[in-house]
Amino acid sequence: MASARPGLITLLTDFGYRDAYVGVMKGVILGRNPWVQLVDLSHEVPPQDIVFGALVLQSAWRYFPPGTIHLAVVDPGVGSRRRLLAAAVGEHFLVGPDNGLFSLIFAEEPPQTLVSLENPRFFLPQVSATFHGRDILAPAAAHLSLGVPLPEFGPELSEPVRLDLPAPQFTESAVTGQVIATDHFGNLITNISFGQLQAWRQGRATCLRVGDRPIPHWAATYSDVPPGALLALAGSHGYLEIACREGNAALVLGAGKGTPVRLVASDGPETLGECRP
């Protein structure tokens, strides 16, 4: 029996809670390390939505203590030739499919060690074609929590898959981007970095449209505008976010992934100016 080693593993999936998938993965992990602490990051990632999963991971991973293992399974390519990986990033570890799910983290902090999960010694004896989260990823995360060094899991992986996220376009007078995700509250997360946006604005008034609808307010918090009002603000993930106070911006605007977002600057104080047709 392995010696007691508490450790901490977070779990992120698109499995939901209706089926037993999440519970079975936890059972596999606890069967190998009954002392490990398991934290559910989210199991409500929209099915097969790798971008949304990547955003959740990027917004959360740094808030956990050193040594945390982040196990993520949003894997529409399960059973195909796509690879599975484990990585050391900063003082954390990542385990999951090599499909871009970790690429936003890798863009912030390149991995020190990155391997392909290929050693069957750390799999379940029977590996199905449709549930690698249970049969490969969960046992790998459990063994990692017990101190197995990354190189024992498989060969070095040099070129992980990167998300093909659309990049916003900045010109002197305008910024063009798009919605890349919608959260539980109906807030629209765009691909426009709020830090870059503020540097571009330079205190100028700005007309902001989502699709063909103008957004009337910049705000620091949701409560800065009246109930039902549409607003733009810096989301906790660091991107420009469009929200509706005490409402659902996605429903109000009829917007979702891919909806265009455009800002046009003009002279004046740092506010949202009038949007003309």
Image (cartoon, helix red, strand yellow):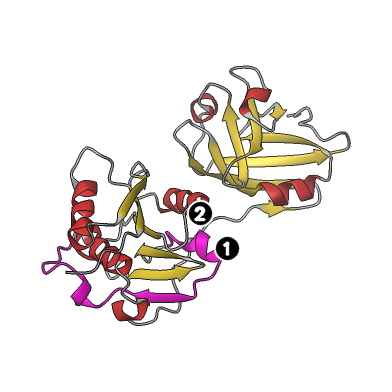
Q: Check if residue 118 falls in the magenta segment.
A: yes
Magenta region, residue range:
100-129
Instruction: Name the image quarter holding the C terminus.
Output: top right
Give, as a three-letter code, the residue at label 1.
Answer: Glu
Percent coordinates x, y for residue 168 in the rendering: 64, 52
Asked whether, in this view, residue 245 is left or right of residue 40, the answer is: right
Percent coordinates x, y for residue 193 in the rendering: 65, 50
Displayed quadrant of residue 86: bottom left
Q: Mark 2 points at which residue?
A: 58
Identify the secondary structure beneath mark 1: helix
Q: Residues within 10 Å of mark 1 (few under 14, many from 20)?
A: few
Q: Which residue is drawn at 71% across and 40% down?
A: 263
Identify the secondary structure beneath mark 2: helix
Q: Mark 1 points at which residue?
A: 108
Viewer can see residue 213: no
Cβ–Cβ under 8 Å for marks 1 and 2: yes
Q: Residues within 10 Å of mark 2 (few under 14, many from 20)?
A: many
Asked whether, in this view, residue 121 is left or right of residue 162, the answer is: left
Give, as a three-letter code, the residue at label 2.
Answer: Gln
Give the number of the disc on residue 127: none
Point out the residue furthest to the top here: 227
Rendered position, 189 above or below 28: above
Rendered position, 199 above or below 214: below
Q: Which residue is drawn at 83% across and 46% down?
A: 202
